[in-house]
Image: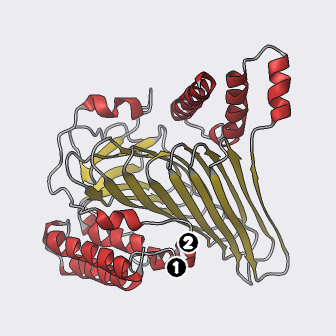
Amino acid sequence: MSSDTMQSTTQRFVDLYRGVRTDLFGADSKESLARRDESIARFGELGVPDRHNEEWKYTNLAAIEKLDFSVDRAVRALDASVIEPYLLEGAAGPRLVFVNGLYSEALSDLTGAAQGVMVERLQSDANLTDLPSDLLDRCADLGALPFARLNTALTAGGALIRVAKNASCVDPIQVLFVTVADDAPVASFPRVAIVAEEGAQATVVENHIALAGAATFTVALTEIQAAANAHVDHARTTELSEGAYHVAAIASRQLRDSRVESCVVATGGEIARHDFRFVLDGENADCNIRGLASLVGDEHVDNHLLVRHAKPNCTSREFFKNILDDSSRGVFCGRIYVDQIAQKTDGVQTNANLLLSDNAQAETRPQLEIYADDVKCTHGATVGQLDEEAIFYLRARGVPEDEARGMLVKGFAGEILDEIRIESLRDRLKEKLFRSTSDRSALQTSL
């Protein structure tokens, strides 16, 4: 994308905001409009990034320049059968469903919340008053991400989950975003805010689904705040159709003795980009970030991480894997940043890539930036193909070649998926991933 094209695309999103500005929630509030106006102005300054931007050198958004996106102003009717395959089996917790970023009351169910757990949709400034307005800036420079600013300006709704002091989610809370475009491209700007107060425990499943149709562009933002001794378990999936573009930021700020676990699983779509900005801002805080992508065709996933250790005695683990077939491409760029005062930091970052095709590509850049002198930090990356000796071993014991390859892929992915505690979600993702792997193997064998 050239500089002129970038400016043109940036201006089109600014114009889109101007066209819907007074239709967004909080439009009757001067403070709300001022916050949105400030965000769109900052987005205009930062602009849609091109590949000259070091953070975007491996991901090309040029294709969106040709797409004339609109936003829905009314909720589209959607049959319940469409979302049924994605619902958490046997879960009795609340469920919020959004279609193209707008809350669908017909598909949602807000009952079943445990005592001390508040689940509601973001629909006014009133339910945002207790959230720090500068979270974007405090989460390790998340505010410098243009699409996080674009989401802040254009979001038409989302989910607010607040768990009170020492309260606990009995059942996981599910937030399901469905993006669908019939004949013309559609953009949506969903948002999730998770607030776990002191000693609270929260379990949240965030699903993003793009249905087949015209092109879609989703700009998502998830904010996690974990107070002292809080524990947040967050799982996020993107299951996208051809022609879907998905750009997301996941921000987390943790206080002392808190723990945040976040697992992101990505399949499908033209481009999926995830920017993680985690800050360990209290002693003995602990975060565990995991990711898995399974791609075919020309699909592309880009995971960018910045984990900042801002206080002493904190622990972080980042473990990301890509399964890449055909001409797909997986990108990983991770950085552990250790402040000078963050002594006794323990950080480990790992990226592993499995290439199932000679045309698949993996780009990996794990990094450490350390200003303390008493730390234990490591990083590593691997890129490889299936072990032919292991395949031979399995075939020698009567396992057909396609099944042998599938078993090895299962073992590779299992290290990520097996850590998902929600059984129905874990089983569904395994079934989808392994079924598609088997189908690809069968097709290759028949050829």
Q: Is residue 287 visible?
A: no
- Seen at 21% across and 59% down, the residue is 71
Q: Is residue 239 shown above or below 132?
A: above
- Seen at 23% across and 63% down, the residue is 68
Label disc, if present, on residue 52 of the rendered structure: 1
Label disc, if present, on residue 95 of the rendered structure: none
| Callouts 1 and 2 close, C-beta under 8 Å | yes
Residue with the most extreme front position: 447
Q: Is residue 446 shown above or below 339?
A: above
| Residue 253 spot, x, y in % from top left | 55, 68
| Disc 1 from disc 2: Cα separation | 6 Å
Mark 2 lies on residue: 57
Residue with the most extreme top position: 398
| Residue 130 spot, x, y in % from top left | 37, 69
Q: Secondary structure at mark 1?
A: loop
- Seen at 26% across and 31% down, the residue is 80
Looking at the image, which is closer to me, 131 or 41?
A: 41
- Seen at 67% across and 24% down, the residue is 402
Q: Is residue 440 visible?
A: yes
| Residue 415 spot, x, y in % from top left | 70, 41
Q: Given the image, on which type of amino acid does mark 2 rest?
A: Lys
Residue 187 lies left or right of residue 221; in this view the side is left
Q: Secondary structure at mark 2?
A: loop
Mark 2 surroundings within 10 Å by alpha-carbon count, few (fewer than 14), some (14 through 19), many (20 or more): few
| Residue 49 spot, x, y in % from top left | 44, 75
Q: Quadrant of the N terminus?
A: bottom left
Q: Quadrant of the C terminus?
A: top right
Q: Place residue 207 in its image quadrant.
A: top left
**Mark closest to the chain's N terminus, 1 or 2:** 1
Looking at the image, which is closer to me, 123 or 6?
A: 6
Q: Given the image, on which type of amino acid does mark 1 rest?
A: His
Q: Is residue 31 shown above or below 260?
A: below
